[in-house]
Every structure is written in structure tokens, then in C-alpha cells.
Amino acid sequence: MVSSTVVYAAVPISVIVAIGLIRKWRSRSWTKYICNTCLRGKTFLITGANSGIGLETAKALVKRKARVIFACRDLNKAKNAIANIRKEQPTGGEMIPMLLDLSSFESIEKFVEIVKAGFHKIDVLINNAGVVVPLDQDAKTKDGFEIHLGVNHLGHYYLTNLLLDHLKRGAPSRVVVVSSTLHEKGKINFADLNLKQEIEDAKRRKGSRRHNPGYCNSKLMNCYFARALADKLSGTGVDVNTCCPGFCYTDLFRNSIRWYHYILMAPVFLLFMRSAQQGAQTVVYCASDYSIEGSSGKFYRDCEPYDSKYPFDKDEEIKLWNVSDELVKARKPIPL
């Protein structure tokens, strides 16, 4: 006769095994990019390359012999990340740590000056860095913009435009904009881009919303920016594409997730959340796969084109570009 102790012990083991099998079954649709084309001689610039998806993207590119610029807000973390990669890949490509704070236009300008002085061209710019901060914290960039607008959109908008000459010099070259399918939840209110009303509502409301409006809006802005830039760079040899890495376990949501969320959401995390390495696959694909060279203005997920459910509007796209241009130039009249 089987003892009750054995039965009780077998139940949680069975549950764990079942969850593992379900996760394995689900992960079959999470494409793994296996092409190992040598990227020696190419320079890749990745924002936020010291952790999460940016770090895993850097690892994959270094393994393929690429030169990778780690453009990070914390230089020490960038250096530590590089040291760890070098231990794993002693014969990989060159890695250069550089200071870049996307919440500061001044930092972006200084960073670009150094890049232009040290590198003849940029082959691929990967706009990966991003933040998610609860709206009730009312976080601002150093230039006074709402944090999601300022870092996720305006910071990359300014950086990319300042590097266009170097990207054109590297043609055929690419700009990869890391967005999210959460852009489909976004809504751009040009009368309140800094979300003053949303922030006031968040401060009054107890608890947080399922989707952070600031983050979703910034991901929509990423998509519009990439679409507009692809049109503007048509015929220059610079491809611009957007991608979604999927729902990934990274420290991106460190400011939004509390300890009890991990308990309440454990089944969802186990079944649906990808690792940073799994999330990086589409980013690496968009940045390096030769089969999509010459293809521009598309959105990719799981290493294939994705049809967004968002009703993109050309007038809204043009208006966002013009407003972004005005916001950047309002600080200092630097030609873009």
C-alpha cells in the first residue's frame, strides 16, 4: 500500500513536471536564430547593452566576431558585463564600453562626439534601452520630460538622428528599434505628451493599472519613429526595422513588480515569460540576417514579419516626428 507521504510528495512533483512540459511545448514557437555568419569588421552600437536583452544581443554578436559598442548609463556595469563575456568568449569580437545617459540630451551629444571621433562608420544601431516606471512616481528626465517619453522615445530619436551620417557611411547598414506589441495599447495625446493628467490620476488611484500608459505610448512612438525614419532614409542603404522580443524576464520592470507579484503571477511567468536570451533572438535576426537586407519599415516578432493591430495613421506619424524635432531643438539649436 502506498503511504500518504509518498502521495503528497508526488503531487507537487507532478505539477512541476507538467508546467515544465507545457512551457517546453509553448517555447516551440519562440524562434531561435541559429545563423552564425561571421560579422568581423562590422560595428554594432547597442544602447543598454549591460543587462537583459541588450546584453544577450551583445553576446550573440560578439560570438559572431562583431565589434560591439556598449552604450550604457552605468559605465562600471558595462565594463563588468564585458569582462564576463570575455571569460565566456575569449576569442570573440571587440567590445567597447561607453557612457550614454538617454535621459540627458547633453550626455547624448557628448557620446555622439566621441563616437564620431573614434569610429569611421556605424554598421548597425540597436535602440534597445528602455525604462518602465510607475506613473505615480512622476519620474522626469534631466531635460524635464516624462521619463518614458524622454528616454524610450526622444532619447533614441535624438541619438539616431545625430548618428545618421555614420550610418549612411556604413551602408548597407541598419537601425533596429526594439519596441513591443504593447504599442497596440498606446495612444498619443499631443495635447499632453508628458502625461500630466495620467500622472495625477495615478497618484489618486490606489494600485497600478495592468498596462503602464507611459510605456505603451513610448513603444507606439518607437514604431512611428521607425516607420517615418524608414521613409526618410529610403534609397540611402540604411534599413530601419522594429521588433518585439516578446514577454521576457529582465530587470526592465524592476520598478513596477513587487515581491508578491512573483507569487501571484508565478504560473503566468512560468508559462509565458521568455528568458532574455530567448527574447534577444529576433533582435539579433533584425540586426544581422542578410536575407532581410534592403527590407525596411517592417515590424518583426519571432524572426518573421508581424502585422500590428494598431491603426497607424500617416498624419499622426508626421506630427509626432515634427513635434519630437521641435522638443529636441527647443533646448539647443543643433541641426538634425
Image (cartoon, rainbow, N blue to C red):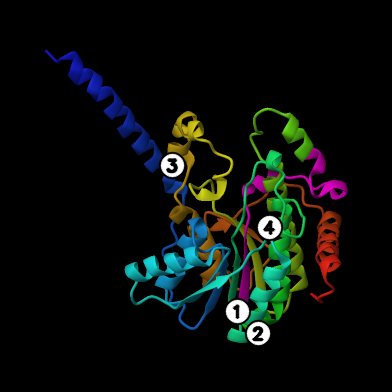
Residue 313, how many percent across, how many down?
81, 53
Residues at badges 2 and 4 in contact (C-beta under 8 Å)? no
* Residue marked by disc 3: 26
Residue 34 quadrant: bottom left
* C-alpha span from label 3 to label 4: 33 Å
Q: Residues within 10 Å of mark 1 (few under 14, many from 20)?
A: many
Q: Is residue 183 above or below residue 295?
A: above
Kind of residue at disc 3 = Arg
* Left or right side of 50 for 13: left
Which residue is at a point 54% across and 63% down the rendered structure image? 74
* C-alpha span from label 2 to label 1: 7 Å
Q: Nearer the viewer, mark 2 or mark 4?
A: 4
Which residue is at a point 55% across and 73% down the rendered structure image? 98
Residue 122: numbered disc: 1
Residues at badges 2 and 1 in contact (C-beta under 8 Å)? yes
* C-alpha span from label 3 to label 2: 42 Å
* Residue marked by disc 4: 151
Marks 3 and 2, the one that precedes in the sequence: 3
In magenta stretch: residue 323:
no
Kind of residue at disc 4 = Val
Marks 3 and 4, the one that precedes in the sequence: 3
* Left or right side of 313 for 281: left
* Left or right side of 15 for 43: right
Q: Quadrant of the N terminus?
A: top left
Name the one closer to the observer, 266 or 203: 203
Q: Is residue 15 above or below residue 230?
A: above
Residues at badges 3 and 2 in contact (C-beta under 8 Å)? no
Residue 31 visible: no
Where disc 3 sits, the SS reads helix
